[in-house]
Image (cartoon, grey):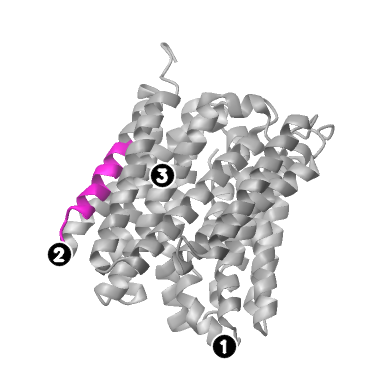
Amino acid sequence: MWKPLLAVCTGYFMVILDVTIINVAVPVVGRDVSASLTAIQWITNGYTLVFAGLLLTGGALGDRLGNRRIFCTGVAVFTASSGACALAPNAPVLVAARLVEGVGAALIVPGSLALLQQAFPDPAARSRAFGLWGSMAGIAASAGPLLGGLLVSTVGWRWVFLINLPVGIACLALTLRYVAPSARHPGRTLDWPAQLAIVAAVALLTAALNEAGRRGWSDPAVLAGAGLAVLATVAFAVRERLARSPVIPLSLLHARATSGGAVIGLLFNFGFYGMVFTASLYFQQQRGFSALGTGLALFPAVAMTMFASVLSGRLSGRTGHRPLVAGGMLLAGLGLAGWAAAGNDPAYVLLVAPMMAAGFGTSFALTGATATVMGSAPAGYSGTASALFNTTRQIGSATGVALGGSLLATATDYTAGVRTSMAAGALAYLAAAALAWACVPPKRAGS
């Protein structure tokens, strides 16, 4: 029964791992392939830009052609491009391979949730499955620097990509054997002008947020990117109103559970990934930890994600999703507020509890938020709902990292910048808690 979950989570873990595992390898990679600063930025961020920009396209293709088919195509593309990254002789080839990796990731993620919804029709089992799926993100994102540091210091940076080959092959074999084929809707046309507009909007916004952390929020390039993203969003909205087959049906956006759940996803990714990014820099630059030591320092937050997701999935049948999402966000917000109030030079033991609270609360809430969004999707639009949810989460991640980087770069006192970043994350979590109480449906009597 749980073999489909193993197949889907293996692919999702691989995708999220590649967002962060490259960070500690970049200096070595740059020297080895003689990459310029611009090329290094593209090696790091190009994958994320393509991944975020094409998520809605991947979801629409899954609904039209079958989510299992698109998921397997994404796994194959991702695995092959990972091999190309590992064998890249120079920077241009590595950048191109990373961009193709992003295409594969955008095909994998929307289908992953749609396939779980298909494989687990029982609501209680589905909640547990969504919880374990969600925990993969926190584990993969936080384990990336630790695993990357181990691989770079032992067998070399190319194994950062080679490790995906056996994982991808296993994922493909498990999916083809244990995941049932998905329904297709070939009569549903793809509105390519709207698809291109949303790709441009998400890619431009993600690029602007990434650059804001390095250049500053008032930099002309950052402002231009943000302005163009707004124009692309307006073009997308106009096109959606005119299209016979919109990318995101208006009924999906008008549903409070869907739109509210998507915003909650943005807010808790903002808080969690902003914390991981800021804490990583703090431990390395202020405390002098190595990449491996930083990974170990962050491990308590990672360990909480798996435990919280399992607990949340089991409790949802008794309480419904609303108290779990609101309670998880409240706990995470109090945790980051505790870091912000911990003082200028707190002992590590005083930072463990805030990190654990944030990791636990985020994963505890993710199960209910995911189930809320997926449960509100009309028939035949599970891939699109998954893509919408994961797109807003990616935007939240990019915003959290960008704001954290900007605060650290502009603060006169580095520790004060860290505390301000944690306070911003706490506010995002608390806003998500309030939104959850308003938008997540309560448990129905007798259900």
> Which quarter of the figure is the C terminus placed in?
top left
Q: Position of residue 136 (x, y in %)?
A: 47, 51
Residue hosting label 3: 268
Disc on the earlier residue, 1 or 2: 1
> Which quarter of the figure is the N terminus placed in?
top right
Q: Main secondary structure of the magenta part?
A: helix
Q: Position of residue 116 (x, y in %)?
A: 58, 38
Q: Residues within 10 Å of mark 3 (few under 14, many from 20)?
A: many
- Secondary structure of the residue carrying tag 2 is loop
Residue drawn at x 36%, y 39% as measured from the top left: 364
Residue drawn at x 51%, y 37% as measured from the top left: 262
Q: Position of residue 306 (x, y in %)?
A: 38, 48
Along the viewing direction, whichever of 207 and 167 lies nearer the viewer: 207
Disc on res. 32 = 1
Callout 2, which amino acid? Ala
Q: Which residues are magenta?
A: 328-347
Residue hosting label 2: 347
Disc on the earlier residue, 3 or 2: 3
As drawn, which residue projects farthest toward the right?
187
The number of numbered badges drawn on the structure is 3
Callout 1, which amino acid? Asp
Disc on the earlier residue, 1 or 3: 1
| Image-quadrant location for residue 252 | top right
Residue drawn at x 35%, y 23% as measured from the top left: 319
Along the viewing direction, whichever of 257 and 233 lies nearer the viewer: 233
In front: mark 1 or mark 3?
3
Residue drawn at x 40%, y 64% as measured from the top left: 405
| Image-quadrant location for residue 203 | bottom right
